[in-house]
Amino acid sequence: MPDRLRALYIPPMNTNAILLILAAGAVLSVSAAPVPADDPFIWLEQAHSERAMQWVEAENAKTSAALESNPLFSTLSMMQG
């Protein structure tokens, strides 16, 4: 192995340790992120609450209506089965 590549070589065991440390750091930085006090959708964090489920159903209805109004949608639906 050329000397310039030997300086870049990291043994597999060390590579796994480095990746684990980077992943742990990423998880900790995301979980420690502050929640904005003015988040208008904070109630969606309660994913299975009645209010969130009503919102999901309303959004699904809007999406379905938009898709079904497109002529290509029926063509794709027929292709699916």
Image: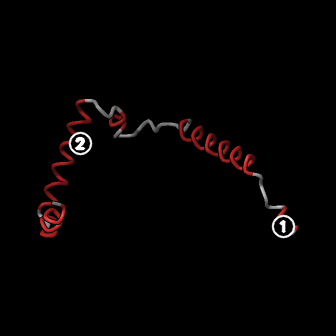
Instruction: Tell me the number on the disc at residue 35.
Output: none
Furthest residue toward front: 1
Label 2 crowd (10 A; few <14 / some 14-19 / many >=20): some
Amino acid, disc 2: Val
In this view of the protein, which residue sits in the foreground, 54 or 35?
54
In this view of the protein, which residue sits in the foreground, 76 or 25?
76
Q: Position of residue 61 (x, y in %)?
A: 15, 49
Q: Position of residue 50 (x, y in %)?
A: 23, 30
Residue to which mark 2 is pinned: 56
Label 1 crowd (10 A; few <14 / some 14-19 / many >=20): few
Amino acid, disc 1: Met
The relative height of residue 1 versus residue 26 in the rendered view (above or below) is: below
Quadrant (top left, top right, bottom left, bottom right) of the C terminus: bottom left
Instruction: Tell me the number on the disc at residue 1.
Output: 1
Residue at position x 18%, y 44% from top? 58
Q: Position of residue 59 (x, y in %)?
A: 21, 47
